[in-house]
Image (cartoon, helix red, strand yellow):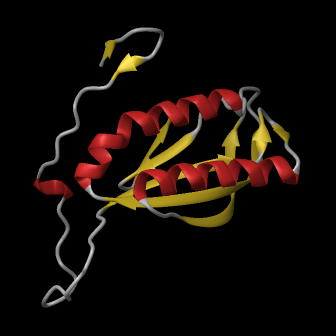
């Protein structure tokens, strides 16, 4: 990565290799089948720092995240869960989290990944998070 204009780093071009191609789950591909092999997951926190936020604000965060994923990939799925992390003070903090998952193809993701990264970094700061969880193809990243 190199520094671009402003304080953010410039991300190198994304390249797809054979590792990204998954096997066809059917003997033959049904007519009109769409394969979206890349999975992106955003963990939406219900806290501002270590403090819980109100239900309306949490719903707004989930709606914003869903709109972003739908805009990038055409759809998403949302599940609710509980996340736990160690705070800067060393305590284990449990919080409600919304887990929003979007699926896309490699070409689409390549075109939109910079926009996604900018959005995630902006929301991390706006939501007062030390880090925002983002999962890509099963790998968790704290941004």
Q: How many marks?
A: 0
102 or 92: nearer the viewer: 102
Report whether 31 appears left or right of 129: left
Where the N terminus falls, by quadrant?
top left
At 45% from the left and 49% from the top, the residue drawn is: 135
Q: Residue at x 43, y 35 (%)?
A: 115
Quick check: 87 left or right of 115?
A: right
Q: Position of residue 35 (x, y in %)?
A: 26, 71
Classify residue 138 as left or right of residue 75.
left
* Residue at 35%, 55% in the rendered image: 137
Q: Residue at x 48, y 52 (%)?
A: 71
Q: Quadrant of residue 80?
A: bottom right
- On the question of residue 143 being in view, the answer is no
Please determine whether, in this image, residue 31 is positioned above or below residue 57.
Answer: below
Percent position of residue 110, x then y: 27, 43
Q: Percent from the top left, x then y, of residue 21?
A: 17, 62
Q: Examine the rendered structure and indicate whether residue 75 appears above or below residue 94.
A: below
Left or right of 14? Residue 88 is right
Task: Looking at this view, name the residue that lies furthest to the right.
Answer: 54
- Residue 52 visible here: yes
From the viewer's side, name the closer residue of 43 and 117: 117
Q: For this rendering, which residue is in front, 13 or 88?
A: 13
Vertical arrangement, residue 47 with respect to residue 43, above or below:
above
């Amino acid at each position: 990565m190199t520094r671009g204009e402003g304080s953010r780093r410039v991300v190198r071009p994304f390249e797809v290799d054979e590792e990204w191609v998954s096997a066809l789950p059917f003997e033959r591909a049904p007519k009109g089948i769409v394969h979206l092999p890349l999975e992106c997951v955003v963990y939406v926190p219900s806290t501002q720092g270590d403090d819980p936020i109100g239900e309306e604000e949490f719903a707004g965060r989930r709606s914003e995240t869903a709109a972003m994923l739908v805009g990038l990939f055409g759809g998403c799925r949302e599940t609710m869960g509980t996340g736990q992390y160690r705070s800067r003070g060393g305590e284990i903090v449990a919080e409600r989290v919304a887990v929003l998952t979007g699926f896309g193809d490699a070409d689409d993701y390549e075109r939109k990944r910079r926009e996604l990264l900018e959005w995630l970094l902006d929301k991390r700061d706006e939501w007062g998070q030390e880090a925002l969880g983002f999962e890509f193809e099963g790998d968790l990243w704290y941004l």
